[in-house]
Image: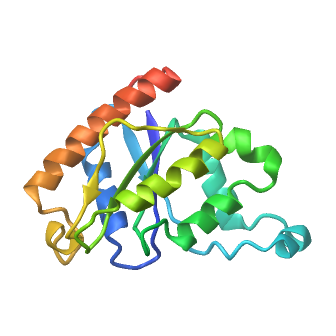
Amino acid sequence: MKIVGIPGSLRRGSFNRALLEAARERAPDGVELEVASIAGIPLYDADREQADGVPEPVTRLKDLIADADAILLASPEYNASLPGVMKNAVDWCTRPPKDIGRVWGGKPVGLMGATPGRGGTRFAQAAWLPVLHALGAVPWGGKHLYVAGAAGAFDPQGKLVDEAVDALLREYLSAFSEFVTQVRGVRS
């Protein structure tokens, strides 16, 4: 089973990238988790798309998503909603519109997130749901993973050190893998 993890932050020390790296290291047997990047994706501009086509970083991300069995979005929460840079990347991945089904259609999507704040990423994860439904993806509503106080959950090098979060992440990944198997018929 191949899962593509997409961190929703460009920050070098992103807690969400660190969360996906921890997920990659803890993926159940038979599950390969590749951590993608949204770096280098310009702001969406229809004039730019018409003049130059879809930028190479977008094409690369679209192909990774299309070739995967599932997607794992690790989304920060900005002002009680989803981050603009991540939404921009998703918007680019719908261009041209004829590619939406190839890239997103029927694709299981798990949501998780880490934030230094106390509230976790509940609002951001909820804000992603209508977007994912509109794309024809299949959001997973099983377990939830909201990492609050992320500065204490990861060491300065970005390694997950919080044992409770570690256990929750392992449970989350196991259950998400089972969901992907149900939706896509892919065995880990």
**Rendered image quadrant of residue 137:** top right
Q: Position of residue 130 (x, y in %)?
A: 57, 49
Apparent side of residue 134 relative to residue 36 in the rendered image (left or right): right
Apparent side of residue 163 relative to residue 130 in the rendered image (left or right): left
**Rendered image quadrant of residue 174:** top left
Nearest the eye: 121 or 58: 121
Q: Position of residue 14 (x, y in %)?
A: 35, 73
Q: Which residue of the protein is positioned furthest toward the right in this rendering? A: 51
Q: Residue at x 35, y 65 (%)?
A: 16
Apparent side of residue 46 relative to residue 185 in the rendered image (left or right): right
Q: Does residue 150 sit above or below 109 in this rendering?
A: below
Nearest the eye: 14 or 79: 79
User: Does residue 107 appear anywhere in the picture?
Assistant: yes
Apparent side of residue 116 relative to residue 42 in the rendered image (left or right): left
Q: Residue at x 22, y 39 (%)?
A: 171
Q: Residue at x 73, y 72 (%)?
A: 44
Q: Position of residue 91 (x, y in %)?
A: 67, 61
Q: Does residue 64 sit above or below 182 in this rendering?
A: below
Task: Point out the image quarter for the C terminus.
Answer: top left
User: Does residue 186 appear anywhere in the picture?
Assistant: no
Nearest the eye: 186 or 81: 81
Q: Residue at x 72, y 39 (%)?
A: 101
Q: Position of residue 78 (x, y in %)?
A: 43, 73
Task: Point out the image quarter for the N terminus.
Answer: top left
